[in-house]
Image (spheres, helix red, strand yellow):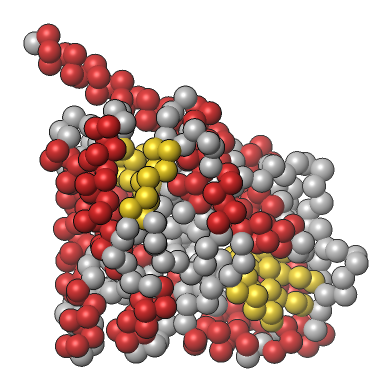
Amino acid sequence: MLRALSLAKYLPGNGVRVDVLTARNAPAVGKDLTLLQQVPSEVTIHRTWTLDLPFWLRKSVKKALTGGRAKAASPAPQAGRSGGNPLRRWIGNLLLPDPQVGWLPFALPAAVRIIRERSIDAVLITVPPYSSVKVVMRLRRLFPDLPIVLDFRDEWLTTTLDLVSFNNNDRARLVAQSTEREAVHAATTVVLVTEAARCELQSRYPDLPPESFVCIHNGYDATPPQAQARFPGLSSSRQKVVLTYIGSVYGSTDPGSFIEAVRALPEAVRSRLHVRFIGHIEAPEYREQLLSLGDTIELKGFVPQAEALAAIRDTDYLLLITHDRINVAAKFYDYLGGGKPILGAVHPQGDVRRLLEETRAGNWADVGDPQSIRRMLIEAIEASGTFREPDFGRIAEYHRRPLTARYASLLRGLVESGQNSQKGQAHS
């Protein structure tokens, strides 16, 4: 939810008064309450209860649905999927589109009250959780002329439903398709965080004007790196090359091909490598695979954001793993802001590859080709790889401050357009 935090943090400086509606007891992998200190005092936060499952219970149910198996890294939608045995299917179908659907009975009346009492000019709904898109249709019925922005931090149907979702059987897919379609048509504007996602959604709804779909990327908060930054910067004070991965490990970041590449390293090279994984590991299978690397690997688990950012500064290289062609993990932008070279095991046709090449922030290898990843690691460890000078000007454009200024301009335009439309109707 760092995107939502950045909007609350920077929109007031762009002349936008911000009210935030969120859940008081929302479950999460971990909580970093220090992030609240970044929210300006002029932002009004409204909290409601939710009937969402506690995180540990949700994971237990998900394990029952999947049989404890990690999801495949390369989804291939298949007709006739039933989600396993009838009991598993019944449990999974109780909570559609996702377990956070229990927030809606509290969120909707609160949203209506806030809109009326606070004279709200525009509403921005950011997802996931994807159940929140249902708020779009319900608000549209009550406020026909209200500008509503639907902000997709991750594209839903093409990749996320298979790689990450709580449930992806046939019924779950049908619910997701109908829910997204209704919400997109009810929204005034749909914002995506990658060009690939924008093109995907626009092609899915050709009946809507192309200008209804806008790309505003995620970003980072650190001071933008400067040209004098060391790149690459192998530390002479350490005996080993440190490679750091930050973020959750789940379907779209399946580390299998990376692990295979590390195992295949010559012993003289591997002995010089220390890999740190910082973040939640979704499946026991992934944890076991990583631990099989022995002394090469260190698993640190979830840490507060400040500690994660410190780890970015205190490393030689940053490791990025993604099988996703469309979505770009938020941590990629924190990597950009960290100024350290990125080693990416990525989808060869994905937006992450495009952004790496555009910013010249590091090197990449095909995530499906362990030998290619192995060669990239050897070059990095031996400091023989070719790293071009980063495009620091392009990297600076991904700071959250200018990105939020774009968002503020979008919101003002929607509000002004709606006001002018109402004036035209009044004079007609």
Relative image position of residue 62 (x, y in whole percent):
34, 80
Left or right relative to 292: residue 325: left
Q: Is residue 400 visible?
A: yes
230, 37: nearer the viewer? 37
The residue furthest top is 427
The residue sitting at 12% across, 9% down in the picture is 427
Q: Residue at x 28, y 59 (%)?
A: 103
Residue 303, by quadrant, is: bottom right
Toward the left, the furthest residue is: 428
Out of 199 and 26, give the one closest to the viewer. 26
Quadrant of the image containing the C terminus: top left
At x 88% / y 75%, what residue is drawn? 239
Residue farthest to the right, as pictured: 237
Q: Is residue 159 above or below residue 41?
A: below
Q: Position of residue 371 (x, y in %)?
A: 61, 79
User: Which of 320 and 22 lies nearest the eye of the viewer?
Assistant: 22
Q: Position of residue 302 (x, y in %)?
A: 58, 70
**Residue 356 appears in the rendering:** no
